[in-house]
Amino acid sequence: MGANASQLEKEIGSDQFPANEHYFGLVNFGNTCYCNSVLQALYFCRPFREKVLDYKARNKRNTKETLLTCLADLFHNIATQKKKTGTVAPKKFIARLRKENEVFDNYMQQDAHEFLNYLLNTIADLLSAEKGSNQTNHSTNTWVHEIFQGTLTNETRCLNCESLSSKDEDFLDLSVDVDQNTSITHCLTVFSNTETLSSEQKYYCENCCSKQEAQKRMRIKKLPMILALHLKRFKYTESQNRHTKLSYRVVFPLELRLFNKTSNIECDDKLYDLVAVVIHCGSGPNRGHYISIVKSFGSWLLFDDDLVDKIDASAIEDFYGLTTDTQKTSESGYILFYQSRD
């Protein structure tokens, strides 16, 4: 380690620093932490990073600038740095994002989940357009889908004739409701709970040709390689006419075992490892700040725009949320990225 080694390099130690890995903070261009935090999380989702870098390698010349080429350039810029640590300015990416989508074309704090959703869908669309596939289900076979797509089954059972109708829907990330002092496993269980449709909500049964009481539930049919879990922390309250933040404490484990909810095959469960978390700090959706924590070669790092710090795994508990509602500001997990073990 030379005298000019960064504080971070000293903390990690030269003998411990992973070969070919770079920890670079991202410059904030006026409330762009929602973007920076998601980009860092995605960079440390290894399968995604590899595909983006591979895309860059294969599209070296005359490609027209898109959000994906800008992302590929940014990832390539980080991955090919001479130094181990430092900062890069994602200027071109932000400029492109603002050009492409007016939602992000301002200096206001945006929702990190909305940005993640937009980014993944845009990349998927660009990739399928490049494939020249114009079938109706055009974008189901891109590497974005290979990595992030899972399938839900929406089942409805008529309580009069017992007929079952089920409809599959794909997802790139899963949004779950949160409660105070609970866990991710609990949130996922609630997500799959059976709900009864009665009175106003009766279901039109094709078989009975009339509205009937019914039971419905959502179950996970196919688990993705990387599960992006979005905690619905911003809730619209009519009385206040605005979105308020639920800073509830929701425990997210470093290891998550998920069962394929629709099959009875015992072996069909997957073990997931937490690889990244986008954290919202503050009291409301339009103010506050986003940071991210990522796992890299067994160490945890905290990315706060241009700052990068090594943190202890035990410090992750600080990002579960608040146990009481009296504390006002909180740093709470907002989007969790879990990668399945092969």
Image: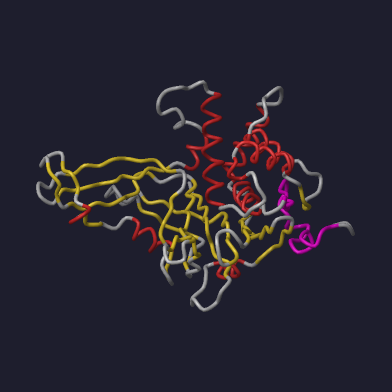
Residue for point 25% across, 57% down = 195
- The magenta stretch spans which residues? 5-29
Main SS type for the magenta part?
Answer: loop
- Eyeballing the image, is 9 above or below 46? below
- Eyeballing the image, is 8 above or below 227? below
Query: How far from the left and from the top, in percent, is residue 108?
Result: 64, 53
The quadrant in which residue 295 appears is bottom right
Viewer can see residue 146:
yes
Residue at the right extreme, as displayed: 3
Viewer can see residue 23:
no
Q: Is residue 39 left or right of residue 242?
A: right
Residue for point 64% across, 40% down = 97
Q: 6 or 264, which lies in front?
A: 6
Q: 186 or 13, which lies in front?
A: 186
Query: How far from the left and from the top, in percent, is residue 206?
Result: 15, 39
Query: How far from the left and from the top, in percent, is residue 141?
Result: 46, 31
- Eyeballing the image, is 90 above or below 324? above
Query: How far from the left and from the top, in percent, is residue 47?
Result: 57, 42
Q: Is residue 127 left or right of residue 62?
A: left
- Based on the picture, tell me whether residue 195 belongs to the magenta stretch: no
Q: 59 or 233, which lies in front?
A: 233
Q: Is residue 153 left or right of residue 53?
A: left
Q: How is the image coloured?
A: secondary structure
